[in-house]
Image (cartoon, rainbow, N blue to C red):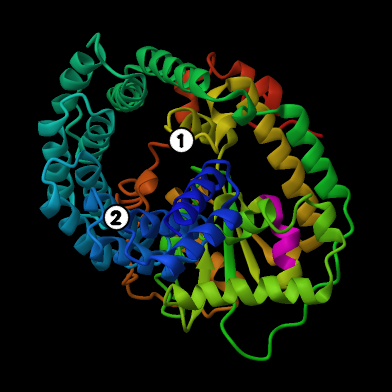
Amino acid sequence: MADDKHSIIRQADAALNAGDITTAVSGYRRVLGIDNSLADVWFNLGYALRIQRKFPEALDCYSHALDHKVQRPEEAHLNRAAIFTEQLNAYDKARTELDAALERNPVFVAGWLNLGLLYEDTGNIAEARYAYGRALQIDPQSGRALSRLAAIATFENKVSTEVGRLEAALRLPSLAPNDAVDIAFGLANLYDAMGRHEQAFALAASANQAQHRFLPEASRYDPVAHEKLIDSICNMTLPPPLLKADKGLEPNVFICGLFRSGSTLAEQLLARHSDIVAGGEHDFIPETVRGNLQPYPEKLATATRAELESIRLDYVSRLAANGHVSGQVTDKRCDNFLHIGFIKTLFPHAKIVHSYRAPLDNAVSLFFQHFSEDINYSMDLGHLGHWLAQYRKIMTHWKSLYGTDIHDFSYDATVHSPEAEVRAMVEHCGLTWREGSPSTNNVVKTASAWQVRQPLHQRSSGRWRNYEHDLLPVMHAAGIDEDGNWLSF
């Protein structure tokens, strides 16, 4: 029996490493049926269930791993904190888990970094700065800590306090490549804030090139494949839309557009209305596309009513699991602009808020941001321009189908005339305009955390002019003229 147990573990581990999550979960469950005291198996099962988006079960598994004295318990607490933060919006519980992780291991750098991110997301500057400072005490070359401190300094208009530290860190010969990229992006944004634009763009370009070199070939942006996908979506015949559910919670407002286009600002302003609940980013739609709807969009075009009803029920169930039980809930997943047809098939009465800004300002903001490999088009100016062109193409298509249900929320117009823009957005969502109270949900994911907490300003509008010559590859690939306007199709 012992040999069988260890053999099953090896097979499950191999399946997990190969990405065969279903087989891994089955194997781990089978082992625990033989011996439920195996802490590492509980931990790995929790990880696999997290990938499957079965978050309550994953939390239970990590708890069992802790009960059975898993090695490095701080890792189990960190994983629980990530689920509470990223999926369940339970920030107090996440804080409790991170505190527990750091109590177990006070020199756990990942714990301090995640605590700093949590404090940033909830708007606690002093606590975030302290957490990053502790991370730097343990690892003086932590690029993530240094770059986040730079972002806080920019928000506080104390840019000069961090420039020297990041410049010195970037010169260290022992600096790890990933830390160097983090620091370079942070320093590029400091230079930008100081008006040192030539240095800023050169450093951002260097950081993007380095990040691109790290990407596996299969993860790199493929313009031909992306253009083929956009053409397939635009040419597909969508299945008939589902009828509105008789009862139960449904998402009412989907906020989408390019990353860094003002979608967070749109959600925060909309959530000032007492009938709107800011739901944040839900990855359900893109996850479903990557999973159950492959090949996409062909699988969507042939989906049965029962299959679509099941997907809709799953989405609504996850909203409820995240604590959203009343009110109009927003879904602010930016790249849902690729899937507006899918969304309107599931939820035909949903309203779409399309956030947008001047395309070259958007391009600059993307190029200066350190994204994960999922946003692989922002690392190359030509690729970035191609992505912008394909975004424009698909949004033009969706507006031809759902024009009255898609509202354009202009970041640039909002910083000049906020009340008129917010009123139009609120009324588009079928609500009566009134000045509401600030949202009780003051949580903003880190990439936009400090920007949307500043008073509305016009400094980001027209920012591209500082980099006009550098942006020529974007302009040529996207079809944008010398004044920053889209050319005619």
Q: Nearer the viewer, residue 117 or 256?
A: 117
- Left or right placement of residue 187 versus residue 58 in this view: left
Vertical order, 291 against 90 (above or below): above
Q: Residue at coordinates 75% horizontally, 71% vertically from top-left?
A: 308
Residue 56 in the image: x percent, y percent?
Answer: 42, 71
> What whole-number distance in Å separates the C-alpha atoms at marks 2 and 1?
25 Å
Q: Quadrant of the C terminus?
A: top right
Q: What stretch is highlighted in magenta?
A: 338-344
Main SS, magenta residues = helix
Looking at the image, can residue 327 be seen? yes
Dot 1: element = loop
**In the drawing, does residue 294 fall left or right of residue 372?**
right
Residue to which mark 1 is pinned = 371
> Compared with residue 86, is residue 197 higher up or lower down, i.e. above or below?
above
Q: Nearer the viewer, residue 158 or 58?
A: 58
The amino acid type of the residue labelled 1 equals: Phe
Residue drawn at x 30%, y 47% is: 450
* Residue drawn at 42 percent across, 64 percent down: 58
Read off the residue under disc 2. Answer: 76
Residue 413 is one of the magenta-drawn residues: no
